[in-house]
Amino acid sequence: MLTTMSMKNAYLLSVLDDLKAKSAHEPEFLQAVEEVLESLEPVVEADPRYEQQNVIGRMVEPERIVMFRVPWVDDSGKVQVNRGYRVQFNSAIGPYKGGLRFHPTVNLSVVKFLGFEQIFKNSLTTLPMGGGKGGSDFDPKGKSDAEVMRFCQSFMTELQRHIGPDTDVPAGDIGVGAREIGFLFGQYKKIRDEFTGVLTGKGLSYGGSLARTEATGFGLCYFADAQLRDNGQSFQGKKVVISGSGNVAIYANQKCTQLGGKVIAMSDSNGYIVDENGINYKVIQEIKEVNRARIKTYLDYVPSAKYVEGCSGIWTVPCDIAMPCATQNEIGETAADTLIANGCIGVFEGANMPSTPGAIAAYQAAGILFAPAKASNAGGVATSGLEMSQNSERLSWTFEEVDAKLKGIMEGIYAACAAAAEQYGMKGNIQAGANIAGFLKVADAMLWQGI
Ligand code: NDP
């Protein structure tokens, strides 16, 4: 259920009411917009140009949406049809940039919420990237490599008309990893006869960047570390629960273990594992990246661990630090209350919008640390931006160079969010700071560029 109780600004309320009337069937998108607009109240009140030029009304409307049919043939010879999407949300500060998600739950509302969040996230990285997102309701799970290839080829046959290295540069997201990016890139090259940096997350042999695979998880931990240190804390000796076991979760585990934390629980959509001795990320890497198996098979490696069917119970595992790295709305108010009652000192978001508005209200009421996804998971897209730079230069940087830049960017994002929050009278509210700092650059560019 959406709430507007704290928002009083008439202009923002009218934009939101108008959007609710037009997009009533897009709950995730409305949730993401409302969360941002609430934080922008002091900004809009301080500068009348945002209302005069209707900057917010323009910002909540995507510049362009492409929806398309994706027909493909499965291994039994049957013709399957999925739906493809690309939402090109905002190009004020650079070419559209944002991942592709392949998951059965993908619909227009999900792609619009992700695209909207991406505008602010990309702005926070300080790199010149606009916001976009795309995907399909195709489920790569259980499909053969040949089926995934045929699907990706069909998807790109249409998408290639709408993207390009200076127009729109997609990347991976849920269900889109190195295998899918490879097939998508191969098809783009075949049709367009161009070898360009049109996608990021590419393999190292054809233009990918070192450390891109690790970037979102590592970046999340660099951000969390900066926030913890700013509050007199650290990862040292902390018990950490990470939901998910995909790209973000695996490398969040690696980095927070390096920083002194102990990851005691991880999950997939079927269930979760608990290992009080600490989960070695290399085991999860083998289960997920090599075997494409279920997390339950962790028990074959560590028989003393526990497996629980159903993924939502993971937040009942007592921990000091929670890192939701699976999907949207995975922590509701009840789960947030449980985390807090069990002594959790901070929630650092790796997934996009994993906390419901009720959960965020609970963190705020309890005064625990909260890192909002659009800031704390920006390391992936930031490193995609670095991949684009390397592609333009026709150069490859070392792992250490990219990792050092990533760390600097994440610490810079934390500092920018903290400073914006303080400037607008909300010291310590990193959620509001992220929305404000991300907004200001895009809004300024929109004002300069006219209607
Ligand atoms: P992956 O596909 O690599 O992994 C996703 C993980 O989350 C899997 O363990 C999956 O389990 C689980 N999961 C997915 N959907 C659900 C669901 N509906 N319920 C429960 N579990 C689910 O994706 P990523 O790690 O790349 O992405 C995870 C999150 O991080 C997403 O919110 C994404 O938008 C965000 N993100 C990713 C970035 C990146 O660079 N990859 C960058 C910024 C944000 P199962 O295998 O069983 O489906």
Image (cartoon, helix red, strand yellow):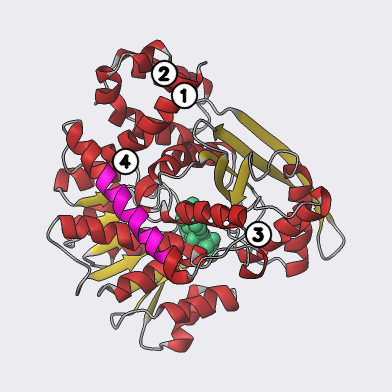
- Range of residues picked out in magenta: 403-416
Mark 4 vs mark 1: give the one in front: 1
Which residue type does callout 1 highlight? Met
Q: Of callouts 1 and 3, which one flags the residue occurring earlier in the amino acid sequence?
A: 3
Q: Which is more toward the observer, 375 or 385?
A: 385
Q: Circle 3 sits in a helix, a strand or a loop, which is it?
A: helix
User: How far apart in space, not on screen, are marks 4 and 1 (Cα)?
Assistant: 19 Å
Q: Which residue is mark 4?
A: 434
Which residue type does callout 4 highlight? Ala
User: How far apart in space, not on screen, are marks 2 and 1 (Cα)?
Assistant: 17 Å
Label of residue 15 in the image: 2
Mark 3 vs mark 2: give the one in front: 3
Q: Which is more toward the observer, 6 or 309?
A: 6
Mark 1 vs mark 3: give the one in front: 1
Asked if residue 412 is among those painted magenta in the image, a careful observer would answer yes
Label of residue 446 in the image: 1
Q: Which is more toward the observer, 277 or 350?
A: 350
Q: Which is more toward the observer, 221 or 92?
A: 92
User: How far apart in space, not on screen, are marks 1 and 3 (Cα)?
Assistant: 32 Å
Q: Circle 1 sits in a helix, a strand or a loop, which is it?
A: helix
Can residue 389 be seen? yes
Asked if residue 105 is among those painted magenta in the image, a careful observer would answer no
Say whether mark 1 is within 8 Å of ligand 1.
no
